[in-house]
Each structure stands twice: as C-alpha cells, then as structure tokens.
Amino acid sequence: MPTIALVGAGTRLGLSLGRVFGRHGFDVALVARSEEGLGELAEKLAAEGVKAAGFPADVTDRPTLIAALDRAAARFGGIEVLQYSAPYVQVGDTGMTAVLDVTVENLRPQVEGSCYGAITATRAVLPAMVAAGAGTLLYTTGASAVAPTPWAGSAGAAGAALRNWAINLNGALADQGVYVGYVAIGAWIVGTPGRPEDASPMEPDDIAEVHWDMHITRDPAEHLITP
C-alpha cells in the first residue's frame, strides 16, 4: 500500500487527512511532538480501518525529524506522499503575532516550524521520490501567507516564505515525476479554539478532500481554500 506521512498531525486536519487518504488505500505515518497524542490519533484511524502509526518528532529538531521520517519509510516500505502543516507554536503562544509586534525573536520560531521544518522533511523523502519518478509533496498554511493579515503578522511572513519555496519547487520537479502543491486555508476549521462568532467554519474532512484532489489531479500548484 502507498503511504502518506503527515507532519504536524493533529486532531482536526491531521485526523481528517489520515481518514481521507486511508479511505483511498493509504497507510498513514503520523509525525508530531506528542507521543501520547500520536497514539490516540493512530487508534482513531485504526478504528476506521486505516493502518497508522506515530513517529514522535519536534520539527525544529532537524535530526530527530529526519530520523522519524526514516523510521516511517522503513516501517511502511516508503513514503509516496508528504503533507506538511506544522507552524511552530511554543507553549503559551498562539503564534498569531500582530505585524507591529513582530520581532526577530517571535518570528524565528514560526520560520523554524513553517519553513525550515518543511525543507528538512522534504529533503528526507525527496530522493526516494525522484528515484521512483513519482511522489507528492503538499504544504499547508493559513491564508495570511497569501492575503496579508495584520493580526497574523509572524505566521503570515513565515507561511509566505514556505509558499514561495513550494511553488518554486513544483516547477523544478515538474519533469521528475514529483508534484508539489501548496494549500492556504482561509477559513476557520470546526473545533479550532478562539474562532470568532462571525467566522464561517469549515469541516476538516472537506479541507482534506481538497488535498486528496490535488494529489490525484496533480494540479494546481497552489489552492486558496475559502468558506
């Protein structure tokens, strides 16, 4: 069976991505910081008939992230799809620093998580994809990376860096059989804490289906999701 590695897997979009890809015959490698949380996600997917396993790693710890993806590839026999959505949020921090309050100190963790972690994860799985002449790389951030939002200054700046790199990467890999897609979520996911009362929520399964469609059609290079 093919395998998708979900880096930054959580209880909303991560679970839905595992469910949607699993429904189409994929095994699921879950990568996130919490070993306990990964175990719970794997159990939920297993209850739906999806083979899944967790591989704990902090995306800012590059050697550990590479090792986790290597273990996942060894466990499942390879990684055909990588989906990355791990903006780094420290304990007690929302990660949403307003543009006038952005400093090097509070931007650095966001860049480490959104951009450096994505590059690290990609370099761990890309050689095998290129050798096989097939593979999918999907990167997901909030829409502030595409449509600048003052209250999300740091997250938007970090996400924009990832977006630029991902779209360039898609062009560079187009003739090597590897598709790269970037997804910007311009909606509040159902269950997300702090959602404004007037915000239109979206079900995570619907967002996961967009990722699946991009993987299947290998188009477009970027997709902005709105309610």
Image: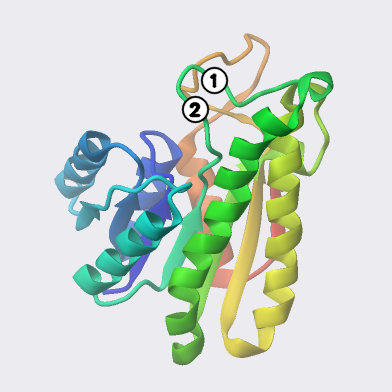
Q: Position of residue 42 (x, y in %)?
A: 21, 46
List the single residue furthest toward the top: 197
Q: Amino acid at mark 2?
A: Gln
Q: Quadrant of the N terminus?
A: bottom left
Does residue 153 appear left or right of residue 111 in this picture? Answer: right
State how many labels appear. 2
Does residue 11 appear left or right of residue 55 in this picture? Answer: right
Mark identifier at residue 90: 2
Look at the picture and state if 178 lies above or below 116: below
Using the rendered view, name the quadrant where residue 62 is placed: bottom left
In percent of the image, x 58 and y 63: which residue is there?
Answer: 214
In percent of the image, x 31 and y 76: which residue is there?
Answer: 78
Mark identifier at residue 172: none
Q: Quadrant of the C terminus?
A: top right
Q: Position of residue 73 (x, y in %)?
A: 29, 71
Q: Residues within 10 Å of mark 1 (few under 14, many from 20)?
A: few
Q: Residues within 10 Å of mark 2 (few under 14, many from 20)?
A: few
Res. 207 visible in picture: yes
> Tags 1 and 2 in contact by the CB under 8 Å rule?
yes
Q: Nearer the viewer, residue 47 or 115?
A: 115
Element type where label 2 sits in the image:
loop
Residue that carries the numbered disc 1 in the rendered image: 93
List the single residue furthest toward the front: 105
Res. 50 visible in picture: no
Does residue 116 appear left or right of residue 29 in this picture? Answer: right
Q: Nearer the viewer, residue 88 or 9?
A: 88
Using the rendered view, name the quadrant where residue 112 is placed: top right
In percent of the image, x 23 and y 40: which residue is there?
Answer: 35
Using the rendered view, name the quadrant where residue 29 is placed: bottom left
Q: Position of residue 72 (x, y in %)?
A: 27, 64
